[in-house]
Image (cartoon, grey):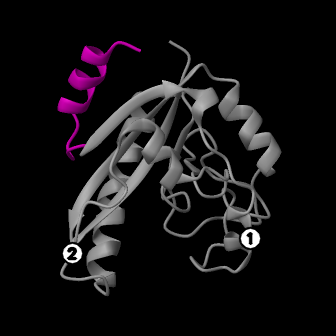
Amino acid sequence: MEKNFIKDFFLNLKIPVHEWAVLPSSKIPFSPSLLDYCKTNACGNYNKSWVCPPACESFEKQREKILSYREVLVFSTLHKIEDSFDYEGMTKGRKKHTFLTSEIKEKLTDTPVFGAASCPICSVCNYPSPCLYPEKRIESVEAAGVDVTKLCKISGLKYNNGQGTVTFFSLVLLNN
């Protein structure tokens, strides 16, 4: 995808993107062991969301879906927090990142988008009843088994931006 198009696209969004990169989907590092973390229910969404295990597509299907696209746009947002225990600040940052990811999904209607943690579209997921907005749904980077730490090294993005910050990542699947 043309870099100038992406720059212009990001300039028109309400929340600033910190860093971004486009890379071949074949470079995306997957780690099925990340799904073990999901099973511990650390984020509280296990068995409560259509985009989280066990309801989401299997690791293999999500990997296959991502690899069926030619390129992946990876982007991050950076948020200031008081310290590493500032849960409220982290939550605010994630909400802003999620808003940006939702805005991108809205503009790129038929493009699969993967965001940080569970889908943000509904305040409470309708799971196990059918998804109310499948066309707006934002998949979970973590539930897809994408190793974001390794992804940052491959794409040249910073995973850790220093003390007093938290960084969130999303993926957009691209064919052109």
Residue type, mark 1 in image: Asp
Taking the spot 69% from the left edge, 58% from the top edge, the residue there is: 50
User: Where is residue 44, by image quadrant?
Assistant: bottom right
Q: Is residue 158 magenta?
A: no
Res. 85 mark: none
Local secondary structure at mark 1: helix
Q: In 3D space, how far apart are the residues under numbered discs 1 and 2 (Cα atoms)? A: 28 Å
Taking the spot 59% from the left edge, 32% from the top edge, the residue there is: 27
Q: Is residue 82 above or below residue 109?
A: below
Foreground of the two, 156 or 111? 156
Q: Is residue 16 magenta?
A: yes
In the picture provided, is 128 more to the left or to the right than 102?
Answer: right
| Residue under numbered circle 2 | 81
Q: Quadrant of the N terminus?
A: top left
Using the rendered image of the protein, determine whether residue 15 is visible from the camera's viewpoint: yes
Using the rendered image of the protein, determine whether residue 12 is visible from the camera's viewpoint: no
Foreground of the two, 134 or 53? 53
User: Where is residue 54, by image quadrant?
Assistant: bottom right
Q: Is residue 65 above or below residue 166?
A: above
Q: Position of residue 32 (x, y in %)?
A: 75, 56
Circles 1 and 2: CB distance less than 8 Å? no
Taking the spot 68% from the left edge, 53% from the top edge, the residue there is: 131
Which residues are the magenta region? 1-17
Residue type, mark 2 in image: Ile
| Residue under numbered circle 1 | 36
Q: Position of residue 53 (x, y in %)?
A: 74, 63
Q: Residues within 10 Å of mark 1 (few under 14, many from 20)?
A: few
In the picture provided, is 138 more to the left or to the right than 41?
Answer: left
In the picture provided, is 62 more to the left or to the right than 123?
Answer: right
* Callout count: 2
Q: Position of residue 116 (x, y in %)?
A: 48, 57
